[in-house]
Structure formats: C-alpha cells, structure tokens
Image (cartoon, rainbow, N blue to C red):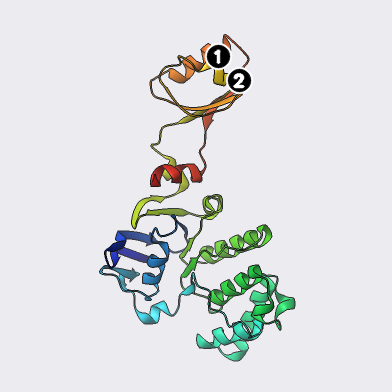
Amino acid sequence: MLELHNVTKCFGDRRALDDVTITLAPGALTGFVGSNGAGKTTTMRIIMGLLEPDSGYVTWDGSPLTTEQRRTFGYMPEERGLYPKQPVREQLIYFGRLHSMTSAQAARRADHLLETFDLADRGTTRIEQLSLGNQQRVQIAVALMHHPEALILDEPFSGLDPEAVDAMGILVRTCAESGVPVLFSSHQLDLVERLCDQIVVISAGKVVAAGTAEKLRAGRDPVIRLDAPNIGDRLQGAEGIEVKKVTTGSVLFTPKQAGAGEALLRRTLMQSEVSHFGEVILPLSEIYKEMVS
C-alpha cells in the first residue's frame, strides 16, 4: 500500500500541491488526471524522492517510505532519460544491472520485454534511430526491467500509436493484477476510464475527486437525451429543464423539477415522432470538465 498523507508543496509563492492525500492499493490501477500544471508531476516526484514535501509524508505499508524501498519502484519520468547512442538491448541490460540483476538475468528480462513491446528486431538499434513512439516503448521497458514493487508512470501513453496504446494498456493491467500498485497520468480520459480501477482528479494542486468512474458519476444530476425532428424548435416554453446541448434533431437536458422530462416527452409526442428518450451515461471527459471548471 502506497499512500500520500496531506502533502503540500510550494515553489515560491505558488502552491503546487495543497493537502494532497492519495491511496494506491496493491493490485489497483490508478489514473491521475488534471490539466497541465495541476500538480501531477510534482506528486510523482515526491513519491520517488526527487522532491521533498513542505509538509505531509509518504508511506509504504504504513511506514515512512525509504530510499531503499523507492529503489524497488519503476518510474517513468516526464523528461525521458535514455542514452540516445546506446543500442536498445544493451541499454535495458545496463539498467537491469543498476538494479543488481546479474548479466544473465538482465539479458533474459531484456529479451522478454523486447518481445512484449514488439521491439525484438530493434535490439541492436541505437535509441536515436528509433521513432518517438518506439523510444517511448523502450522508456517504459526500462521502468519494468527489475520487476518493480510499484509503478509510477508520467504520461506513459504519450506519442504511442493506437496499437501500442492497447499493448501498453494490457501490460500495465497485468502489472497491477500481479499485486503492484500502478499510478499513471494521462490526458486521454477515455483510456483512463477504460483501464483504471480508481481515478484521481487534481486541479490547482488539490485533489477534487477520487474513486471509480461510477463513483465520480454518482450524485450528479441525470442527463437525458431526446431525439425528435426539429426538437430545437420545440423547446420554447419548456419548463423545469436545463438544456445542455441542442441540435436540430436532438437535445440533452437535465430535469430540474420532478416530471419535467416526461412532460417534455409528452409535449413532443403530440407534435412529432420520438426516436429516442433516455438517460445518457456521461463520459469521464464531461464529468472532468464539470469538476475543474
């Protein structure tokens, strides 16, 4: 169990993190979402010991996180840290050796990861000769070389093509299912919703929501979609609803009074056919916009 307790961090007059508390459970995949500058990278750097919090602390299984324990973590930083002129396989083995693996162990692990990331034919290629997407794959492979106890990934899906995104999603899910707590940041909210057991939303240094996608949706006013010809022309005088979006043939609205949605449906049926009427499950991207607005 990896936990941040009431962590605050300032840079001059700017409060980058404000009383941040997050729990990363074993075997759980946690998506960390927020706009640029919201505090995601600062949080990850504090977990990895690259920054010290001004107040608050980080624990591992209930005890203060130590340098030795951090060395067992896999970390993919925002700024990539590969050696551009070193061949891929040689580089993976080098990082494995830094984690006290034997040469044989590091070679076997490197070959396995190269196969997993569809890079088996690039083992002797220098990093600088790879596409940006393949460089990204190598960077993630480095983070996985030593079978990490926890995995902290800053924008791991950035620059990957859809096929690589799918492969990476399977890989991080497999890591989580082995009992490893995984935290990754991403701006791809549809991907976060699809992959994650828990989602943490941070805005201006504060955690504004945390939980499953279903929990984040809970308690919000329902949004209903009604499809009918020229529905946009029929909303004049409709009472008890808040229109979210309207086109010629469809309207999204939230009922603000009991029975207001059904009243609009009956009114519309008197004038035209209705092809759809029902509640809409909002995507995480829409919920996120409401939380940080």
Image quarter for residue 84?
Answer: bottom right
- In the depicted structure, whether residue 286 falls above or below residue 263: below
Mark 1, secondary structure of its residue: helix
Q: Residue furthest front?
A: 13
Image quarter for residue 56?
Answer: bottom left
Total numbered labels placed on residues in the image: 2
Q: Quadrant of the C terminus?
A: top left
* Residue 219 coordinates in the image, percent (x, y): 38, 37
Given the image, on which type of amino acid does mark 2 rest?
Ala
- In the depicted structure, whether residue 122 falls above or below residue 291: below
Q: Residue furthest bottom?
A: 103
**Residue positioned 66% across, 84% down in the render:** 87
Given the image, on which type of amino acid does mark 1 rest?
Thr
As rendered, which of 89 and 249 lies closer to the eye?
A: 249
As rendered, which of 214 and 13 lies closer to the eye?
A: 13
Q: Quadrant of the N terminus?
A: bottom left
* Residue 185 coordinates in the image, percent (x, y): 48, 61
- In the depicted structure, whether residue 183 falls above or below residue 229: below
Q: Residue furthest left?
A: 55
How many other residues sit within 10 Å of disc 1, few (<14), some (14-19) or many (≥20)?
some
The answer to whether residue 120 is left or right of residue 18 is: right
How many other residues sit within 10 Å of disc 2, few (<14), some (14-19) or many (≥20)?
many
* Residue 181 coordinates in the image, percent (x, y): 45, 65
Q: Is residue 1 visible?
A: no
Q: Which residue is mark 1?
A: 268
Q: Disc 1 vs disc 2: Cβ atoms closer than 8 Å?
A: yes
**Residue positioned 55% across, 65% down in the render:** 156
Which numbered tag is attached to residue 228?
Answer: 2
Mark 2, secondary structure of its residue: loop
The answer to whether residue 42 is left or right of residue 168 is: left
